Amino acid sequence: MKNKKLKNPPLLEAIFELKWELKKKTKNLIKPNYQILPGMLYDKLKDKYPEYEELPANKIPSEIAPYIIQHRFRQSQNQWPLFQLGSGILTFNDTKQYTWNSFKDNISYLLENFYDLYPEKDKLIVNSLLLQYMNGIPIDKIKNNSFDFLHKKMGINIELKKELFDNSGINSNPLAFDYKFVFLVNEPEGALHLRLSLGKIKNIENLIWEHKFISQNIKLINSPENILKWLEKSHNILEKWFLELTKGDLYRSFL
C-alpha cells in the first residue's frame, strides 16, 4: 500500500495538520510575528507552490482568529496538493493523486522550511498533530441496504431490532446515518477516530468513511524529525485499518 497507487481510490482528501501553542494576551490569543510568516513561506516555497490564495478569514485580525486557515498555497491553480496556514495552524492536503511516499516527502519539505523560517523558534511548542483520510464509496441504497453493505463489504455490524420495523410501514433502510467511534492508542499516544455516514458527492449517494489519528498535548514532539516519526507511526495504524476494513471485494474494486 505504501508504494502502491490505487487505480480507483476511494480517497476524497488526505490531511496532515499541525497546531502550536499561542501566547495569551488579555482575552485574545496571539502568535509572535505571525503576520510576517505567510510572506516568508511564500517567498521560500514559491518555486514549488507558486499559486497563493488569500482566504476570506484573512480579513479577520489574527489576534481574534486563532487556529483558522487564512492562507492557501498550491502547486498549480485550483489543484492539489496544497498547504494552508493560519495563526497557530499549518496543514498539508492532497487528493486523488495521493501516494504515501509523495505525501510524506511533501510534509517533510514543508516542515523543514516552516521550522527554518519560524520567528522565535524557542517559543514554538507543538500541541496537536493530526493525520486524516476522508473516503467516499458510491452506494446504491435502492439495491443495497446500507447496513448490509457495511456488514458484507467492511465487516462492520450495525443493527437495529427487526421488531422496530415489523408492520410499521417504516423502511428499514436508513436515509441517513452518522456513526463515530474513538479508540485510545498507546504508541504513538493519541486517539484513533472512525466515522461512517451517508452523504452525496457530485449528487451520487456515498458512504462517507473518515478515519484519523490525533495526538494532543505532545510538547516533546517539537522538531521536524520527531513529527515525521509520529507521522510514520500514525500512518501505519491507519493503513492497517484501511486494509482490514476493505479486505476482499471492496479492496479489489479499488485496483
Image (spheres, grey):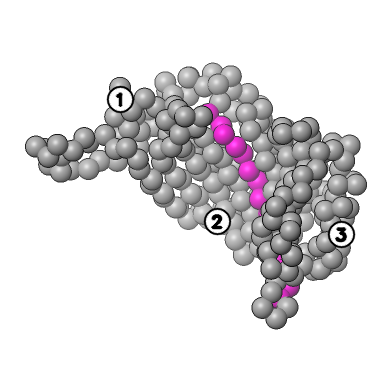
Would you place residue 114 above or below residue 174 in this image?
below
Viewer-side residue, 27 vs 116: 27
Say which residue appears at 62% left-offset and 65% top-offset: 217
Query: Of helix, strand and loop, which mostly describes the magenta segment?
Result: strand
The circle drawn on residue 190 is 2
Magenta segment? 10-24
Where 10 falls versus 16 (above or below)? above
Which residue has dot 3 on it? 36
Q: CA distance from mark 2 to mark 1?
A: 39 Å
Q: Nearer the viewer, mark 2 or mark 1?
A: 1
Residue 183 in view: yes
Q: Is residue 18 magenta?
A: yes
Residue 236 drawn at (x, y percent): 58, 40
- Mark 3: which amino acid? Ile
Q: State the quadrant of the C terminus.
A: top right
Q: Residue at x 55, y 56 (%)?
A: 190
How far apart marks 3 and 2 lie (CA) works out to: 32 Å
